[in-house]
């Protein structure tokens, strides 16, 4: 995912406070590119108040007269809507849609359109969209505040990005490399021998014991250090078994 390629587009927003709220929601979730299509009352200090520490998002926002100006260079356009429209369109919730936007953003310019507080996006505006996004709500009241709708979409993108980054961070920050497949195989052999030595595993009736232990260790994902500790425990156990056998 490349969030630099994802822009939030607000169409004809009435309340400048909402524009500030959107800027804050975006900055909280790591988005930076805001387009304002013909805002009705902007600039306005209410926007600054609501943005709090996200004034930089307002300062770099691009104000354009028409929707077309905001999205001509975009290859993937998502329209958000609280209502089902007469003509069915490919429709996803915010989580599903975040995945599609993330995919597209690695190669393409992505725009997410948000409509007017009073009447949303027009059918014509929704028709230029590749996908429609609906945030599921209670049936009693489906229309969210504009900034809150942006917050939810931006949050889903943020969560997706963090989950994509996790394996890299996990590897980068870990103090010991993860065990190689070859070393894990040596470990399983050693474990099996030791379990036979202590008569926990009966080689004539092994059942599923080794498979279950393999599943346990693959689920945990041992690092080399942990693997060495376990190998040490096994070696010591084998020594004690030998000594006990000699003694008896
Ligand atoms: N009355 C309008 C709602 C406008 S709310 C309508 O029926 O469409 C302002 C904007 O917030 C909407 O245009 C949309 O961009 C966004 N929004 C509000 N609720 C939403 C929801 N449940 N799902 C997706 N977007 C929503």
Image (cartoon, rainbow, N blue to C red):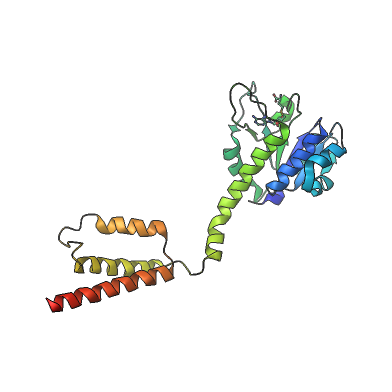
State how many labels appear. 0
Q: Where does the image place residue 196, in percent across and percent down from the top left? A: 20, 66
Above or below for 198 versus 47: below
Residue drawn at x 65%, y 39% as measured from the top left: 153
Near-viewer residue (170 or 52): 52
Above or below for 39 versus 193: above
Near-viewer residue (154 or 86): 154
Relative side of 39 to 89, left or right: right
Residue drawn at x 59%, y 52% as measured from the top left: 162
Residue drawn at x 53%, y 61% as measured from the top left: 170
**Which quadrant of the figure shows ligand 1?**
top right
Quarter of the figure with residue 145 = top right
Q: Where does the image place residue 199, in percent across and percent down from the top left? A: 18, 65
Image quadrant occupied by the C terminus: bottom left
Quarter of the figure with residue 117 = top right
Relative side of 116 to 181, left or right: right
Viewer can see residue 101: no
Above or below for 66 versus 61: above
Above or below for 204 versus 224: above
Viewer can see residue 156: yes
Q: Residue furthest left?
A: 248
Near-viewer residue (27 or 206): 27
Q: Where does the image place residue 161, in percent across and percent down from the top left? A: 60, 50
Q: Where does the image place residue 73, in percent across and percent down from the top left? A: 76, 44
């Amino acid at each position: 995912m490349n969030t630099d390629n994802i822009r939030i587009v607000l169409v004809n927003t009435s309340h400048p406070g909402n524009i500030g709220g959107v800027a804050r929601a975006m900055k909280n979730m790591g988005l930076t590119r805001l387009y304002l299509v013909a805002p009705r009352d902007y600039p306005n200090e209410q926007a600054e108040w609501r943005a709090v520490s996200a004034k930089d998002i307002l300062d770099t926002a691009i104000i354009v007269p028409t929707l077309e100006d905001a999205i001509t260079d975009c290859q993937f356009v998502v329209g958000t809507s609280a209502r089902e429209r007469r003509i069915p369109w490919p429709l996803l919730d915010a989580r599903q849609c975040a995945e599609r936007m993330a995919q597209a953003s690695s190669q393409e310019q992505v725009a997410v359109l948000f409509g007017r507080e009073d009447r949303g996006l027009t059918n014509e505006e929704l028709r230029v969209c590749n996908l429609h996004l609906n945030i599921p709500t209670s049936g009693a009241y489906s229309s969210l505040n504009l900034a809150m709708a942006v917050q939810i979409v931006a949050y889903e993108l943020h969560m997706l990005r963090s989950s994509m980054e996790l394996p890299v961070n996990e590897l980068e920050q870990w103090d010991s490399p993860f065990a190689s497949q070859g070393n894990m195989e040596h470990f399983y052999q050693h474990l099996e021998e030791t379990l036979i030595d202590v008569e926990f595993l009966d080689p004539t009736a092994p059942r599923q014991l080794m498979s279950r232990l393999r599943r346990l260790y693959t689920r945990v994902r041992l690092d080399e250090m942990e693997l060495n500790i376990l190998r040490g425990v096994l070696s010591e156990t084998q020594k004690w078994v030998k000594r006990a056998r000699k003694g008896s």
